[in-house]
Image (cartoon, coloured by chain):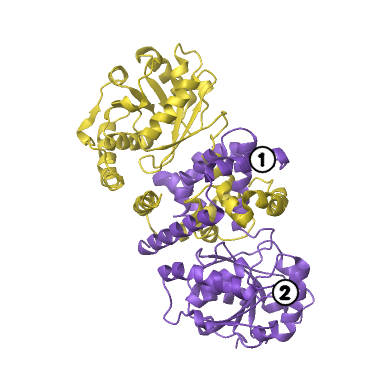
Chain colours: A purple, B yellow
Amino acid sequence: MSRYKKANSIKSVGIVGTGTIGASWTSYFLAKGFKVKAWDPGDNWEVKLEEFIDNAWPDLEKLGFSDEASKSNLSLCDDLGEVANEVDFIQESAPEQLGVKQDLFKVLDKITPASVIISSSTSGLIMSEMQSNLSTSERFVVGHPFNPPHLIPLVEVVGGKMTASEVVNWTIDFYNTIGKHAIKINKEVPGHLANRLQAALWREAVLAVQNGLASVADVNAAVAQGPGLRWALMGPHMVMHLAGGKGGLEKMLTHFAPGIEDWWQTMMENPDMDQQLHKLLVDGIEAEADNKSIGELEEERDARLIKLLGMLRETS
Amino acid sequence: MSRYKKANSIKSVGIVGTGTIGASWTSYFLAKGFKVKAWDPGDNWEVKLEEFIDNAWPDLEKLGFSDEASKSNLSLCDDLGEVANEVDFIQESAPEQLGVKQDLFKVLDKITPASVIISSSTSGLIMSEMQSNLSTSERFVVGHPFNPPHLIPLVEVVGGKMTASEVVNWTIDFYNTIGKHAIKINKEVPGHLANRLQAALWREAVLAVQNGLASVADVNAAVAQGPGLRWALMGPHMVMHLAGGKGGLEKMLTHFAPGIEDWWQTMMENPDMDQQLHKLLVDGIEAEADNKSIGELEEERDARLIKLLGMLRETS
């Protein structure tokens, strides 16, 4: 018998670290009806967290509350022990520094019952390095969300060398149960998968500016007015399946892929990220942003994301 | 004074080549109220074209007809001369073979009044090579749409060495006037820009399958449930602007880009596109497609695309 509770019987979640990612997770778990215990070592974190939740709450309502959704299910804890002792699952979103995470995991390892799975939001660190020298390393796993986590469904789940495969599968199951779309990453590589895909695209987008191929705004439009519209509906392999016409991906691979392989040969370069390129990029984005603040751009993005997610759900 | 008509005074369009791309352009121009003269050397092309238009028509109506939109504005021509003689603009969508396009351009060069701009839908060929040895090479330009062209706004405009810069600007202006989002590509490179960006992403997506990082379906979800949702709303540089938080792209470039540059160092590989990999990809996509035909998948895509485009327009 498993030492872990069934994924669909989890009632309470601990949040360790309440920066942007942790606060977003907190909002999501509250909207899904969980009791949430949160803790952060920073100054004034309680106020910032409650502000974040207040901002996110109307958006989460549009996406659909669980019956038990309530901001009053949040407990602000005075120390880590208070979180660790009384929850069924922990989502850790501490700063992206290996030493910080290792020290934190050593404490969680000792004070958290071994039946509680601990999932790290890390985007850039490797679980095998974070989980070394723990007595319960098998229940530490990566559950990497995508920004903003309370809106974007994707969660990448990857285990370290010491993570039990049962824990990886449990964590995928748990996230899917609460309305996320969890995927299984089978190997530990820098950036997991989605950020690598994004980095590959961005490299070519940076090179296009550096090489004078197009302006920053036109490079952005080359995605958002073109393939980006399809990527909201299907992934890159499914796009290629449809690019093959009636013959599907098989035909695409035999007839069109060789042309793309030729392009790949011309795409083996990294940009020189020097001051000149920084200036080109920043000037370009400022021209396109047209004096809109980051806050305004985020609000626009989130308002559209909610409509997009609603449309995708209605048509699925 | 320019020899070209004003972009907003164009009334009639010639379509040369009525395969998928040409038929899609035809549908779009008809929906925007143009008189369209079409010609194709293939068997039975008239029936296929009219079928395509009939299928696309309800979608185009949802996106918004011009007042003069009418299928009856289409003339099916018996030969190329009939198209070339009496139109204000030509969109060429012949097969992607350099010799075919060169031969075609030589004819168009002679029989089309020099005041008519001729735009090629080519995705993979270089205008400088297609326009050599023409007496009116200056009015040949690339206007590369994105599939399906009657739905996706993006058109990439790029001139060859002999193309007049006035023609490049005119063509951008014309496409924007008719509701497309045209961008200016300043150099001739294989795949223009958007397909290169797509190829860069797909390479990493293929490697993820080849290296056993994730299943085909999970790689697709890593885009469509994550960054793909944002790319429908904004391009890759704008995503990075928001990734920098309040500090914007400037902060992103100084604080987070160095981590991405490290990932780039691990992304200098091309997949081995062998039979084994083909099988992995095709088996994966078939599992995900779950017996849906290409036609059904296309219908789903287009129904969602129309809703997505409508939402973006309403919120812009």
Q: Quadrant of the N terminus of chain B?
A: top left
Other residues around mark 1 within 10 Å, as few (<14) / some (14–19) / many (≥20): few
Considering depth in this image, is A175 or B231 the residue closer to the camera?
B231
Q: Is residue A103 left or right of residue A239?
A: right
Mark with earlier residue (1, 2):
2
Q: Is residue B3 left or right of residue B220?
A: left
Q: Residue at x 27, y 30 (%)?
A: B34
Position in image of residue A173 (x %, y %): 53, 75
Looking at the image, is B238 positioned above or below residue B184? below
Looking at the image, is A94 positioned above or below residue B43? below
Q: Given the image, what chain letter belongs to the residue carrying mark 1?
A: A
Other residues around mark 2 within 10 Å, as few (<14) / some (14–19) / many (≥20): some
Q: Tell me, yes or no, whether the two marked residues, 1 and 2, touch with CB atoms within 8 Å.
A: no
Position in image of residue A236 (x %, y %): 51, 51
- Extreme left residue here? B72
Q: Given the image, what chain letter belongs to the residue carrying mark 2?
A: A
- Please tell me if label 1 and label 2 are on a single chain: yes
> Which residue is under mark 2?
A162
Q: Quadrant of residue B270?
A: top right
Q: Which mark is residue A23?
A: none
- What kind of element bears circle 2? loop
Considering depth in this image, is A156 or B180 the residue closer to the camera?
B180
Q: Is residue B283 visible?
A: no
Q: Is residue B118 visible?
A: yes
Considering depth in this image, is B287 or A4 the residue closer to the camera?
A4
Q: Residue at x 63, y 80 (%)?
A: A117
Position in image of residue A218 (x %, y %): 52, 38
Look at label 1 and name its amino acid: Lys
Q: Which mark is residue A279?
A: 1
- What kind of element bears circle 1? helix
Look at label 2 and name its amino acid: Met
